[in-house]
Image: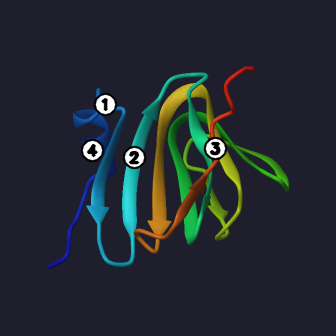
Amino acid sequence: MIDCFSIPDLLAKRASQTSFHVASERHVRIEFRNMDQGDRVERFAYGGDVVVTCFKGEFVVGTAAGDTKLSELAFAVIPADTWTTIECVGRGTIQVIWAPAHAETQKDAPAPAGP
């Protein structure tokens, strides 16, 4: 069975949802995030490759190699095991494709509490 989606319909129908998955298969997971200016995805390193596509707004994808600004219909391909941040700098929507679907994800540990 082939799943088929209309991106404009998805974005319109799920505009009020912060994050939603449209597919989570054996080798790929597809997620959308609606974000406000200043929202960030927690710093992570994914054990597979990640594709971030901007459908609306503006975002900055940050890695040790520098920052990449994404505007409407631009995308970035992030290699496996790359420490990454994603920040919304202009309210919008991104699609995140994770491949393979459920690789190990490392996240920054929270800062220790004060003395």
- The type of residue carrying mark 3 is Ala
Distance in Å between CA atoms under marks 2 and 3: 24 Å
First in sequence: mark 1 or mark 3?
A: 1
- The type of residue carrying mark 2 is Phe
Distance in Å between CA atoms under marks 2 and 1: 10 Å
Splitting the image into 4 quarters, where does residue 49 fall?
A: bottom right
| Disc 2 target residue | 32
| Disc 3 target residue | 109
Q: Residues within 10 Å of mark 4 (few under 14, many from 20)?
A: few
Q: Nearer the viewer, mark 4 or mark 2?
A: 2
Does 69 sit left or right of 36 as displayed?
right
Q: Secondary structure at mark 1?
A: loop
Q: Residues within 10 Å of mark 2 (few under 14, many from 20)?
A: many
First in sequence: mark 2 or mark 1?
A: 1
Distance in Å between CA atoms under marks 4 and 1: 8 Å
First in sequence: mark 4 or mark 2?
A: 4
Does 40 sit left or right of 66 as displayed?
left
- The type of residue carrying mark 1 is Ala
| CB within 8 Å, label 4 to label 2 | yes
| Disc 4 target residue | 10
Q: Quadrant of the N terminus?
A: bottom left
Q: Secondary structure at mark 3?
A: loop
| Disc 1 target residue | 15
**Residue in the image at 68% along x and 51% along y:** 84
Distance in Å between CA atoms under marks 1 and 3: 31 Å
First in sequence: mark 2 or mark 3?
A: 2
| CB within 8 Å, label 3 to label 4 | no
**Residue in the image at 28% along x and 62% along y:** 23
